[in-house]
Image: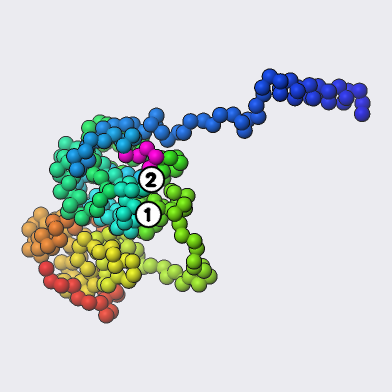
């Protein structure tokens, strides 16, 4: 070893010993940073639930919990009813876990209209079970909460209710896991996110099925995809097998509907149900009254979408039982 190399080695050893003497710590031993998704990020705004309770958003609703949060307004005639119907299916899949270790919160973006009494009537119309709270509060504070949750972008006008962000937020505040998801997702997938992936699969059962034996997946038609993502939140199509039978629809079963109804009327009902109700169409009013005054939403479908949906319903009618008349 050369003299220069020997001096360099002695210098390195001296630095290590000096670092030990003055309490030098490796980076891995440094204190962990504070959690990013705590009460310093989420506003702790006061809210009133549909059952009259006064609650704080962070302290009472999300701290340490697995939650689903969406923003609605009860006078909405299109997307909000569809979203509520879909989440009702997710709640039924999760059962008694909602309100125990998974919590649903629907917050009004129209608090001047949506009083606790209005929210309570809305929850009753959709046959919402225990553990799901509908909440109202101060307009500006709710808008601030929407912004913090990534559901009100800069430049959006919060006063334009019909253009509000349709995504919902699911998360685990304790672990800092948050994600934005579509309310039109398959209800079983939404339930799996809340019950398993956000809880790190701590309650998941041992695997008991071999994926090698799984059946091949049949690609759906455009009409079937529309039915699955839009219509199935409120309607069934014939008898439902197994666990699907528990997700009883809010609206009528649609097996045989294209034989039961005039095709032109049915196409218009799918495309613009709000106009038929406004015109006091006798059949539209009869259906509205029969199904607890839950209005058929206007899905803003194009004529090609309506035709694809009708074609799927017609193709599914072989052996289907007819729809009972209103």
Question: Magenta part of the protein: which range?
Answer: 61-65
What secondary structure is marked by label 2?
A: strand
Task: Give the label, 2 or 1, closer to the camera.
Answer: 2
For the residues bearing labels 2 and 1, Cβ distance under 8 angstroms? no
Residue under the point 13% across and 56% down? 293
**Residue 62 is covered by the magenta coloring:** yes
Task: Looking at this view, name the residue that lies furthest to the right.
Answer: 2
Residue 89 pos. (x, y %): 29, 58
Residue under the point 19% across and 58% down? 296
The foreground one among 181 and 57 is 57
Is 182 displayed left or right of 207 in the figure? left
Residue under the point 40% across and 55% down? 192
> Where is mark 2, residue-wise?
66
2 or 1: tag closer to the N-terminus: 2
Residue 19 pos. (x, y %): 71, 22
Residue 150 in which image quadrant: top left
Residue 260 in which image quadrant: bottom left
Residue 145 pos. (x, y %): 31, 35
Determine the main secondary structure of the stretch shown in magenta.
loop
Q: Residues within 10 Å of mark 1 (few under 14, many from 20)?
A: many
**Residue 35 is covered by the magenta coloring:** no
Quarter containing the C terminus: bottom left
Q: CA distance from mark 2 to mark 1?
A: 13 Å
What secondary structure is marked by label 1?
A: helix
Is any part of residue 144 visible from this angle? no
Quarter containing the N terminus: top right
The dot on residue 190 is 1
């Amino acid at each position: 070893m050369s003299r220069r190399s020997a001096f360099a080695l002695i210098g390195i050893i001296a630095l290590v010993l000096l670092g030990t003497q003055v309490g030098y710590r490796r980076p891995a031993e440094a204190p962990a940073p504070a959690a990013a998704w705590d009460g310093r990020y989420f506003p702790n705004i006061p809210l009133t639930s549909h059952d009259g309770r006064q609650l704080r958003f962070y302290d009472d609703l999300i701290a340490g919990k697995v939650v689903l949060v969406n923003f609605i307004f009860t006078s909405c005639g299109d997307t909000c009813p569809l979203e509520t119907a879909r989440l009702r299916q997710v709640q039924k899949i999760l059962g008694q876990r909602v309100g125990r270790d998974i919590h649903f919160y629907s917050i009004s973006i129209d608090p001047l209209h949506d009083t606790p009494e209005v929210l309570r009537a809305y929850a009753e119309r959709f046959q919402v079970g225990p553990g799901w709270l509908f909440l109202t509060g101060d307009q500006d504070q709710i808008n601030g909460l929407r912004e913090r949750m990534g559901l009100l972008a800069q430049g959006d006008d919060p006063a334009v209710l019909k253009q509000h962000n349709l995504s919902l937020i699911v998360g685990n505040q304790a672990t800092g896991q948050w994600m934005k998801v579509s309310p039109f997702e398959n209800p079983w997938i939404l339930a799996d996110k809340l019950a398993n992936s956000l809880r790190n699969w701590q309650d998941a059962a041992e695997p008991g099925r071999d994926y090698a034996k799984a059946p091949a997946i049949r690609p759906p038609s455009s009409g079937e995809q529309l039915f699955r993502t839009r219509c199935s939140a409120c309607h069934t199509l014939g008898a439902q097998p197994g666990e699907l039978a528990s997700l009883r629809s809010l609206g009528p079963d649609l097996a045989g509907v294209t034989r039961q109804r005039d095709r032109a009327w049915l196409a218009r009902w799918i495309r613009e149900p709000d106009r038929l109700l406004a015109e006091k169409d006798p059949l539209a009013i009869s259906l509205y009254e029969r199904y607890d005054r839950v209005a058929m939403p206007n899905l803003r479908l194009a004529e090609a979408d309506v035709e694809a949906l009708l074609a799927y319903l017609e193709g599914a009618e072989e052996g289907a039982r007819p729809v009972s008349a209103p």
